[in-house]
Amino acid sequence: MSLLRVENLNLAIGAVPILRNVSFGCTAGRITGLIGESGSGKSMTAYAITRLLPKGAVAGGHILLDGSDLLAKSEREMCALRGDDIGLVFQEPMTALNPVKTIGAQVAETVRLHRGATRAEAAHIARDTLNRVGLPAAQFPLNRYPHELSGGQRQRVVIAMAIALRPRLLIADEPTTALDVTTQAGILRLLKKLVAEDGMGLILISHDLGVVADMADDLVIMRHGEVVESGPTAQVFAAQAHPYTRALIRASAHQPTRDAHSGDVPLLEVQNLVRDYALPRASLFAAPGRFRAVNDVSFTLRKGENLGLVGESGCGKSTLTRAILGLEAAQGGTIAINGAPVLAGQKMPAALRRHLQVVFQDPYASFNPRHRVARLVAEPFHLLADAPRGAERAQAVAEALESVGLGAADASRYIHEFSGGQRQRIAIARALIARPELIILDEAVSALDVSIRAQILDLLADLSARFGLSYLFISHDLHVVRKITDRVMVMQAGKIVESGATEAVFAAPQHPYTAALLAAAPHLNIEAHDEALV
Amino acid sequence: MRLAPLLIGLCLVGLFTALALISLVWTPYDVQILEISNKMKPPGGANWLGTDHFGRDILSMIMVGGQVSIAVAVVAVGMGMGLGVPLGLAAAARRGGLMDELIMRGNDLVFAFPALLIAILITAIFGPSAINAIIAIGIFNIPVFARMSRGAALELWTRDFILAARVAGKGPVRISAEHILPNIANLLIVQGTIQFSLAILAEAALSYVGLGAQPPTPSWGRMLADSQTLASLAPHLVLAPGLSIVAMVLGLNMLGDALRDALDPRLNRAAK
């Protein structure tokens, strides 16, 4: 008998239909993976189950929890259910916790609210729950504040809040998307353990098939507000009955066709680069401490080469990027571009800087919302003394947009009119326009859906071949790096711990950290069925 | 729906600005001539809004007083924005540096003096006049805008698109003008309308203690102050300037809100 049954759930916000005839179930003690790309309605389904819908949303159909219809309940009854029978874990552990309350108080709050427990009882339950999620009393007393914890530890607190009352159903909406791979692996293990211990049902919502494939007993695949395929995981992967399922699997494993075209001419040479940050003084008279974010890093990137840089958050890869781009002065070492060296502490001249461009991770933060696309894309022309003007400039913008698969007419539109994938194309167009030799891709595809990511990777491979571009491809995602790079470097705590030809590093990692990263990375080991066979 | 505040705001602000402008060339009666025999007339008849305790026509005084009030507010807010915003942007561009410290501590210094004290200081040195009232109110507006634009700019400086501009080789002045300023414009407009209304009230307060526009030049604030003791005897004396101030401030706020929405490309989707 299933714990939760969603039957013909329809949802509309105003006149816009969001969900159409969504039906699936979740059984106690099993994990149901809810998969879909952005806009597929997977989060809205979770909101409908918890009745935390935005204003103006109208839901039809039935959501049966143990046979009683949640959609028929009053708000007061739902308040009693949320947190007690239904637990929720959100994506962003940074914002899901109240920064001015201790972790103990936040976990205890749920207990006190629903059980009317005394302060002491609630604190006791909070302690037990934090122990269960892997935050033992010795290192994590109840009076810790969220800012004293890492992202993964915070997510554990959020999970503790959700499971404190041993709910029968836990809904986790992209619980690991904001976390590093090794942290992600830990959180997923924890969720699996809790499901087994408490016998609760878990709905694991994710855009990443790789994450869910290893975890889920059942799969529900959604697109455009409809369920396209559902069933036990093994069966879904064996049958791949719906073309969208095959497309998703294919996109996850997508390998852009690219030919290595690197020569032997060095383009970027980094030697013994050191970047220090001053720490706040420990006391009034103590000398300020120093934090070495980039520690004696040396590498060479050859013309036409795609070089990967892999590491988890805080390893110094963003600091390294900023130093290479000349945005921050280094404390030691040299950076040479085309053989012209820039010593530590020197300002990078515009003549060298024009060879470098960058594409950032967040397609929503990368553009000034008040400028039109033409002005945004043309920005790097500032670097050129002989930048084209007037009609020539418009022509250059149009060419850049067309080379990334957009139209010349898009130049007069504002950035909010574009989707995330289109914005990332515009970011690439901006990087291309001044004809640089090296583009630094700083997590450039990490925020994108798998199908969009596959398209962008194809585009990058194509552009690299057409314009003889080199990439420094920075990512925490090993599988993406594997697809697009010739060589890869692994960075840990400011140092490059391993580097070599991509395939060699992936096949036989030499450093234990590389091996740990590879082991933790979720990976889909399923081949998409050939279109012709089905 | 969304047009309503814009239209109402435009009408109110336009009406008072027009009245003030007309008064430059023509008023129903001369406000400099006292006619004691005609004093404290209720609204209606030959004097639409009645007369005050010296027998002057109130409508004419509102028109002429509008000149002073609006001019003081426009110049004072303009001065606050014109000096405060660049200072705030400069402080944000050099956050944590010596310039930031100098600008912000200078701000604190100005903030530490009440506006009235600065006004008294200035009038003690230069004598009371409308010009000095403008300067006093204007000085007090500088730190408001400096602090606000610094705070908003600091947040913007962390964004990726600023980083992209720096990769494009743009310096802090250019980035502040091209990227930061347009993105804090909505804040500035809203704060500007609030400061504008505060400036009208501040001018009224300064005139009340005799440090603003000097008699016989009328201003809304002075009219309010003069008629205060007569409020129970002839309420229209208080209501006319009081309602003028309220209507002007309300109009400005509505106009500011509507302008902010109109200037944001993200909110213009429906219009396309």
Image: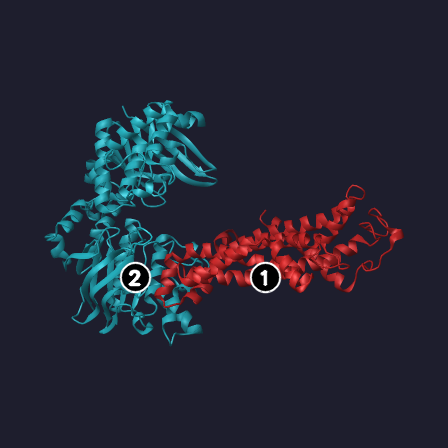
Chain colours: A cyan, B red
Q: Specify the subunit that label 2 lies on.
A: A
Query: Can you name the residue that lies furthest to the bottom here?
Result: A386
Can you give x and y, in whole percent of width and height, for residue B48 in the image? Answer: 81, 51
Whether residue A24 appears in this view of the structure is no
Can you give x and y, in whole percent of width and height, for residue B212 in the image? Answer: 69, 58
Q: Specify the subunit that label 1 lies on.
A: B
Residues B203 and B15: in front is B203
Q: Are marks 2 and 1 in contact (CB under 8 Å)?
A: no
Crowd band around label 1 with a 10 angstrom C-alpha radius: few (<14), some (14–19), many (20+)? some
Q: Disc 1 marks which amino acid?
A: Gly
Residues A317 and A61: in front is A317
Which residue: 70% across, 53% down? B209
Q: Disc 2 marks which amino acid?
A: Arg
Q: Which residue is mark 1?
A: B78
Which residue: 28% across, 63% down? A323
Q: Which residue is mark 2?
A: A322
